[in-house]
Image: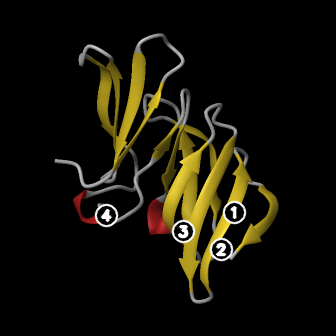
């Protein structure tokens, strides 16, 4: 039983991607057959299930990296895309990714409260954050 998960329809007709809060990713068909997975993303273990579930788009997955203060994009097979990017002392409590996989939304918490921020897939901040 999953405590938290995200799902998104994949670019291929009739497929969707599921990511669970403990870092497992699977690609499924509408009829319930598995195309690939489950693959556990690096940095997730059984004791990190309190992390935000990875967010999925049709062609990319964004997940919390090791140390819980970094983000990393992966392809549908769980392979890293680009380099991880740092959140500078903030812990992620929620993640989102645009359908095209190019914009990431984070809600982070730290000593100064919660903050919402948009990011490019390259790890650059988009605009100002909201608290």
Percent across and percent down for residue 97 are 59, 44
Q: Residues within 10 Å of mark 4 (few under 14, many from 20)?
A: few
What is the C-alpha distance between the residues marked 4 and 3? Answer: 13 Å
> Upstream in the sequence, badge 3 or badge 2?
3
Q: Which residue is mark 3?
A: 69
> Upstream in the sequence, badge 2 or badge 1?
2
Q: Say what secondary structure mark 1 lies in.
A: strand
Q: Would residue 20 be found to the left or right of residue 72 on screen?
A: left
In the rendered image of this protein, does residue 5 appear above or below residue 95? above
Residue shown at 24% from the left, 16% from the top: 33
> Upstream in the sequence, badge 4 or badge 3?
4
Quarter of the image that includes the C terminus: bottom right
Residue shown at 71% from the left, 53% from the top: 119
Q: Say what secondary structure mark 2 lies in.
A: loop
Kindly indicate whether the residue at mark 2 contacts the one at mark 3 (C-beta within 8 angstroms): yes
Q: Quadrant of residue 18?
A: top left
Percent across and percent down for residue 23 are 35, 48
> Upstream in the sequence, badge 4 or badge 1?
4
Q: Which residue is mark 1?
A: 117
Q: Between residues 131 and 17, which one lies in front from this camera angle?
A: 131
Q: Would residue 91 be found to the left or right of residue 28 on screen?
A: right
Percent across and percent down for residue 48 are 31, 63
Q: Residues within 10 Å of mark 2 (few under 14, many from 20)?
A: few
What is the C-alpha distance between the residues marked 4 and 2? Answer: 20 Å
Q: Which residue is mark 2?
A: 88
Q: Is residue 45 visible?
A: yes
Q: Which residue is mark 4?
A: 48
């Amino acid at each position: 039983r999953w405590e938290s998960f995200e799902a998104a329809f994949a670019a291929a007709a009739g497929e969707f991607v599921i990511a669970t809060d403990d870092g497992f990713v699977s690609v499924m068909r509408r009829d319930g057959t598995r195309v690939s997975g489950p693959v556990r993303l690096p940095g997730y273990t059984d004791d990190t299930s309190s992390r935000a579930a990875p967010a999925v788009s049709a062609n990319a997955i964004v997940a919390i990296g090791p140390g819980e203060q970094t983000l990393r994009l992966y392809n549908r097979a769980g392979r890293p895309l680009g380099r991880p990017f740092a959140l500078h002392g903030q812990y992620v409590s929620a993640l989102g990714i645009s359908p095209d996989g190019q914009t990431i939304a984070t809600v982070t918490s730290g000593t100064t409260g919660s903050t919402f921020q948009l990011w490019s897939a390259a790890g650059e901040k988009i605009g100002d954050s909201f608290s």
